[in-house]
Amino acid sequence: MNNKANMLLATCFMVLTLSLLTPLLTWVILLAICAVIMQSALYFRWQEYNPSSRTVNLLAVLSLIALGWFGSSIGLLNSMINLLVIACSLKLMLLSRTKDFLQLFCSCIFLVGCGFIFALGIEAWVGYVAVIVLLFTALSLVYAPARSFRVSMRKSAIILLQAFPLAALLFVVMPQLPPLWQMPTSKSNETGLSDSVTPGDIASLARSSDLAFTATFEQSPPLAEQRYWRAMTMEAFDGKTWTISPRRKQAEAQLKTMGRSLAAHSPNGSLTPSENYQLIVEPSNQRWLYSLDVSAENTDLDNPEMWRQFNYALRAARPIVGKRAFYLSYFPDTPLVSEIYDFDYQLNIQYPIDSNLRTQAWVKQLTANAKSEQSIAEDILRHFKTGGFSYTLQPNAMPNSPIDTFMFEAKAGFCAHYASAMVFALRVAGIPARMVTGYQGGELLSDNVIQVRQYDAHAWVEALIDGVWVSYDPTSMVAPSRITFGLEQALADFNETRNEGMFKDLGSAELFLSIRGWFRQLDYQWSRLVLGFDNQTQTDLLKKLLGDLTSHKMTLFFLSVLGIVSIFLLVLFFPVRRRSTLPKHQRIYLNAVELVSNFTEIARKNKGSTAYFKQVKPFLPVHAASLFGTLTQDFEHAQYQGATDGGRDGQKQKERTMADTLAALQKDLKRTKAN
């Protein structure tokens, strides 16, 4: 086996393992590292032999026992990926034959596919393409060990570049079918918002710059203060933590089974959407989507299955394990009407009467002379604005009676603190209310594109007044710049920063901002044009090319594509007889040797030209032997003494003479065989 190829394969395996840190168990990663170290020791001559088969078999048994023990907690998908990495690690320890190399090579290709399950961005695509080039380079070194690493890599890259146009063509024209099966997921892979909120939880997301979703509007997007992206409503409260109510989940499931759907109400009865937009959602392994109020599925487009709940939240039919595009219509003037009023009222009026007693007493004083429910909400907001509250990512811990502690002692918190306190106060005042979690704001990537990141996570309040859910944002009373200019500006107003450490000032550097903007634009175009290329996008493209999509046009189109693919494959793989690069005198002599070898049935093998002539001379006719002897002498003169005194013209004359001699030799041998 080629040690260089083995080491390159081991390097690729290590890179793939490190790219799969999320689904892999720690001990599986350590096993892979040990296997790579063993292969490195062989390459650098630190040891001479692989471990014994008995040792590796024992490791295999122990690994299977351990994986069986932990497998139930990490999910089916992650268990299978761990099993594949374990198998690759053990095979790497015993890498000694070409068969072993090919098995590990194929397994690494599967690991590349596993990597695309968890990452589909442009950076993952570039990285995995580089790994594939290195894998094929290692394969080339196995079958052509004399070839240099540089040449092998160049040939591998050329092969992939040749395949790229065909892959791109098939990607564009092949029908974009929905998945035939659902990818199993693991709870350990959840990202972003959670279905339960304890004040302070959302603040932890402010440290993350990961992309949550991208919204592309047909026209101009709404203003910053209107960009409230709903994800979930929290309606159950135990005094500390807000969660999605189990009763809500049960009611939504029953209403869906009954076929009831939430209607969109408008003051004038019209349902003309102000704006259509596309939502490209990042993987979250959850079903919830993000939408402006009020949004609904754009029925004119071919959407993945989704539905709108009676709390106005959108849900996908299956967990989002990869980037997916959804098409929505936005109704900005549509009020959030409660269509199941009695249920909403009962669910959102309850609160634990034995918790946060100071806040309960304060609310009762506040409402003693209240004129209306709206005035109560405005008084609570006024209290946040004038009560000396501050906005911070690092509030003090509030383990006991957190709302009392926040309202009367700490007076410093993040959006969830303010939303939690206001919802609790409204319920105490007899006004049904709930906390809404999602995102607020977003960065304009272009005139009609908004990117929303995890640090844009936000919580606000909805109160049920006169049958309509009215939105309030108590955070805006304390940090109004959070709503209009974003989190960074709001923190700066309170002398805080989102980033920590020695590089915290790097994010504001002009060069860094330019580079970051360029990469974000690149990632957006990749997501929109490649990852967002669905059935609807494909249909629109074909309509632009063909006009009305009739069966006759589609048949001709796909036959044309089939013809293009066939011609492309023919050009790539049709055996073309290439022109020999050998000097003409050498080609003439080799043709003569082939004639003589076929006539005498004596192969030349590694013999010199003179030695071969002496060997075959007794078996040739006299005249043919003379002709072959003349060719041999002319060949040796041209090969070892260079051109004749006549220069280039003399060399051409000699080649013509040799060609005439070869023709005479061929006729003589043919005549002899015929007789």
Image (cartoon, grey):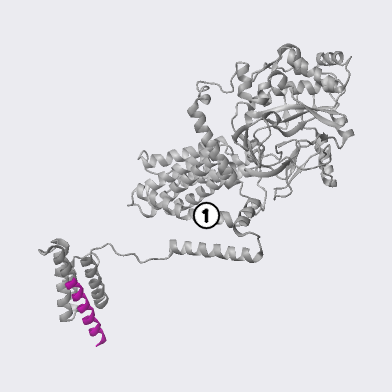
Q: Nearer the viewer, residue 76 or 417?
A: 417
Q: Is residue 660 above or below residue 301?
A: below
x, y percent for residue 626: 14, 77
Q: Is residue 375 left or right of residue 150?
A: right
Say whether residue 514 is magenta: no
x, y percent for residue 258: 85, 46
Q: Is residue 608 left or right of residue 77?
A: left
**Point 44% across, 43% down: residue:** 10
Can I make out residue 178 in this image? Answer: yes
Please, which residue is most extreme toward the left here? 645
The secondary element bearing badge 1 is classed as helix
Please tell me how crowded label 1 is: few (under 14), some (14-19), or many (20+) other residues with Cα within 10 Å. few
Which residue has dot 1 on it?
167
* Highlighted magenta segment, given as a residue range: 656-675
Q: Is residue 590 above or below residue 461?
A: below
Quarter of the image that includes the C terminus: bottom left
